[in-house]
């Protein structure tokens, strides 16, 4: 899996991204045979059109970046994103519910988003920098139980990003057949290799080109 561009989600989630920035993201992803682009919901339709003749998937984020909106909002965002052409949904978990140990709420919300996504891939963003080890384990288990496809480390917009320790813990918890996406602060080939060695099966990064150097 080393130096495999197909596991990279080429990412641009900055609020000031312009259409030309997003077009460049799509073109780089196609040129380098990356697996997906990951963009904010407003760009999904644009990316789906631009990448329609390629193998690059369109991923978007819901409940982003705080995870603190209601489940209905996350479901609505998911439905709109899928209708616009997204085939992968990265949802931010209800972090407050995780901190309180309200696993029924956490599980129901993931199930609701997965139902709205249909056959499309759902990745659950845990925001590991805000959680302790036990919470990372329990959140990962909740994502598996709720029928998600991946757990993901981070939004990249909080106080920290992916760590080797968190990726190892998530992989150990979910087993070998469940997806683990490392994202947040992965900026070069060394970071990329470290995350893959730790157990990541997908890498999210804005510095996608640098990872393959």
Image (cartoon, helix red, strand yellow):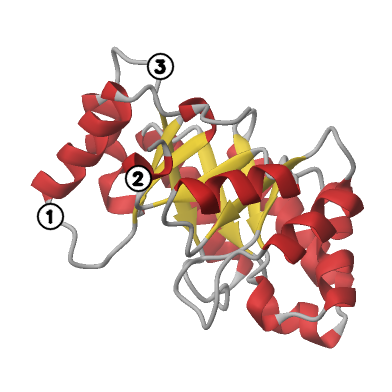
Please give the label number shown on residue 55.
Answer: 3
Q: Is residue 75 above or below residue 180?
A: below
171 relative position to 41: left or right: right
Residue 17, above or below 69:
above
* Label 1 vs 3, first from the N-terminus: 1
Instruction: Kindly give the residue lying farthest to the bottom in the view shown.
Output: 100
CB within 8 Å, label 3 to label 2 = no
Residue carrying label 1: 18
Q: The N terminus lies in which quarter of the figure?
A: top right
Q: Quadrant of residue 157?
A: bottom left
Side (left or right) of 144 relative to 202: right
| Labels 1 and 2: the sequence-earlier one | 1
Q: Position of residue 97 (x, y in %)?
A: 76, 80
170 up-or-down from 192: above or below: below
Report the residue at 53% width, 54% height from top: 191
Residue 210's label in the rendered image is 2
Apparent side of residue 198 relative to residue 162 in the rendered image (left or right): right
């Amino acid at each position: 899996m080393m130096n495999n561009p197909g596991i990279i989600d080429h990412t641009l989630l900055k609020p000031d991204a312009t259409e030309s920035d997003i077009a460049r993201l799509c073109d780089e992803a196609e040129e380098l045979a990356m697996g997906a682009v990951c963009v904010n919901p407003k760009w999904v339709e644009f990316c789906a059109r631009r990448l329609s003749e390629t193998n690059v998937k369109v991923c978007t984020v819901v409940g982003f970046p705080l995870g603190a909106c209601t489940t209905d909002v996350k479901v609505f965002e998911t439905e709109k994103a899928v209708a616009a052409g997204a085939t992968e949904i990265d949802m931010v978990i209800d972090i407050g519910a995780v901190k309180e140990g309200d696993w029924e709420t956490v599980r129901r919300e993931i199930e609701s988003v997965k139902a709205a996504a249909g056959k499309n891939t759902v990745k659950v963003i845990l925001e590991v920098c805000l959680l302790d080890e036990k919470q990372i384990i329990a959140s990962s288990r909740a994502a598996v139980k709720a029928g998600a496809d991946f757990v993901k480390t981070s939004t990249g917009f909080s106080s920290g990003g992916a760590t080797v320790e968190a990726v190892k813990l998530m992989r150990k918890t979910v087993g070998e057949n469940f997806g683990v996406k490392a994202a947040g602060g992965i900026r070069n080939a060394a970071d990329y290799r470290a995350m893959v060695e730790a157990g990541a099966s997908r890498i999210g990064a804005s510095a996608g080109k640098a990872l393959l150097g």
